[in-house]
Image (cartoon, coloured by chain):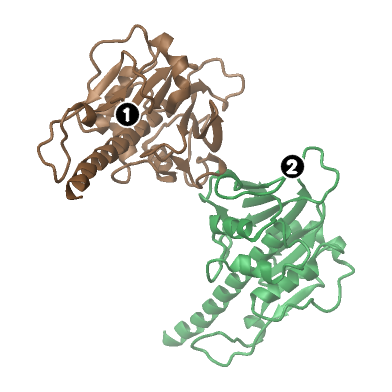
Chain colours: A brown, B green
Amino acid sequence: MAVSTIYSTQALNSTHFLTSSPSSSSKQVFFYRRQTNRRFNTIITCAAQQTVVIGLAADSGCGKSTFMRRLTSVFGGAAEPPKGGNPDSNTLINPQKQYADAVIEVLPTQLIPDDNEGKVLRVRLIMKEGVKYFSPVYLFDEGSTISWIPCGRKLTCSYPGIKFDYAPDSYFDHEVSVVEMDGQFDRLDELIYVESHLSNLSTKFYGEVTQQMLKHADFPGSNNGTGLFQTIVGLKIRDLYEQLIANKATAPAEAAKA
Amino acid sequence: MAVSTIYSTQALNSTHFLTSSPSSSSKQVFFYRRQTNRRFNTIITCAAQQTVVIGLAADSGCGKSTFMRRLTSVFGGAAEPPKGGNPDSNTLINPQKQYADAVIEVLPTQLIPDDNEGKVLRVRLIMKEGVKYFSPVYLFDEGSTISWIPCGRKLTCSYPGIKFDYAPDSYFDHEVSVVEMDGQFDRLDELIYVESHLSNLSTKFYGEVTQQMLKHADFPGSNNGTGLFQTIVGLKIRDLYEQLIANKATAPAEAAKA
């Protein structure tokens, strides 16, 4: 059962999608574990109805491998890139966008007027509203429109600074929330400061996003919104996975009681 | 001793200043009470060094009376306008701006493009940093730069909506924080929603700003930033007054111990 599928495509550099569409692509990554303890449900069978499928598709050079390494790390496994490739992914991306639950779009910065270097990126995390087990990340006040420049009296940043935007929007006629980060992190305190002001991150402890980002500081995009949002999407997928597993384990137990 | 002085002048409609300048104007309003209990210090003598002076100056029609009624209400007295007037206030305002601790500026809205009606106001509360007993109000994250449109999924507003801005700035070479409100309140839930997201309001209980605004809903500007910021400045003055009084009462007691 394809519960969630992650795609990745290219705006300026890359875009990722997490979809709950049952449609399959040739680039699906399966996470499954054999069930040994029915009570705590930390381990499940890989029978068809118990399998959680997480798929990923993206254009070449868009960060599929990096994203999968971040995701594997969030799930607690060793961070190693997936085997093989997907030569057909380019043709699969655009038709799938409408089914996406989460999209990471990479765009040129707006912090540097007429920027030609393309070194500083503006990255958007587009999250569908109303998806079971998936609560979009928000900044300060859920459902309102906010722009935030964290750099100021409490946090100093080097040029051109960091800017966040958060707003409700629509995407392929779906209601979505969009969190955008323009700029890049230069120091650890910038990263933890930003994490502390984002909500619904699905972290298991304060600072887990920062911990994951630091753990893989050598991965591409670890100092900008691509790394931040890949890490966050990894945490959201873990959360969704755990809720799905818990729900599946409860359902048969309750059916047995009845 | 002139501890704090409030002035009011005109941008579009009115501007108020709360200054710690020792300079005096002809429009000073004195709050003093005779001291009967040294321990709790709720009542003080009106000896020169124990008097707290709150002065107010503004151009004609700028809301001096309204502000004083709000302030009196916050202090717990009957809300009645001060006696007499100040025919010379116009010439006193501009030279005093540089000494202001807080300024309320009233400007045209930016929510309606090319607005000619002037019914919707954009109001700025400019607060000096580093003033003893006076902590500037902030929105979401102290010291950063934020714009916030509260109207969205959780709060619906009628046209043209409400927009807040918060940022550090400088004013007459002083470091200040500026909170700006553009638009107006149509419903009670808008007011309490906004109050719940402002910090350092010096309220004594949750919703005190809203309670004061509702209590005087018939006062001019009660549905926009002039009423909101007049009420907040009233609360800040009460807080400053109470800290001053507490400090003055503690100092002689400690001197007696030594």
**Quarter residue B100 falls in:** bottom right
Mark 1 vs mark 2: give the one in front: 1
**Which residue is farthest top?**
A87
**Quarter residue A221 falls in:** top left
- Residue at screen point 56% across, 84% down: B42
Q: Nearer the viewer, residue B208 or B41?
A: B208
Residue position for label 1: A3
Please tell me how many numbered marks the rendered image carries. Answer: 2
Figure check: B99 above or below A103 = below
Which chain is indicated by disc 1? A
Residue B10: where, in percent of width, then height? Answer: 82, 56
Residue position for label 2: B110
Residue A41: where, in percent of width, then height? Answer: 17, 41
Three-letter amino acid code of the residue under disc 2: Gln
Neighbor class of circle 1 (other Cα within 10 Å; few <14, some 14-19, many 20+) is some
Q: Nearer the viewer, residue A11 or A175?
A: A175
Three-letter amino acid code of the residue under disc 1: Val
Figure check: A67 above or below A153 = above
Helix, strand or loop status at disc 1: loop
Neighbor class of circle 2 (other Cα within 10 Å; few <14, some 14-19, many 20+) is some
Figure check: A77 above or below A249 = above
Which chain is indicated by disc 2? B
**Is B122 placed left or right of B170 in the picture?**
right
**Is A48 placed left or right of A163 in the picture?**
left
**Which residue is farthest bottom?**
B36
Figure check: B218 above or below B32 = above
Check whether the beta carbons of the residues at disc 1 and disc 2 lie within 8 A of each other.
Answer: no
Residue B169: where, in percent of width, then height? Answer: 63, 46
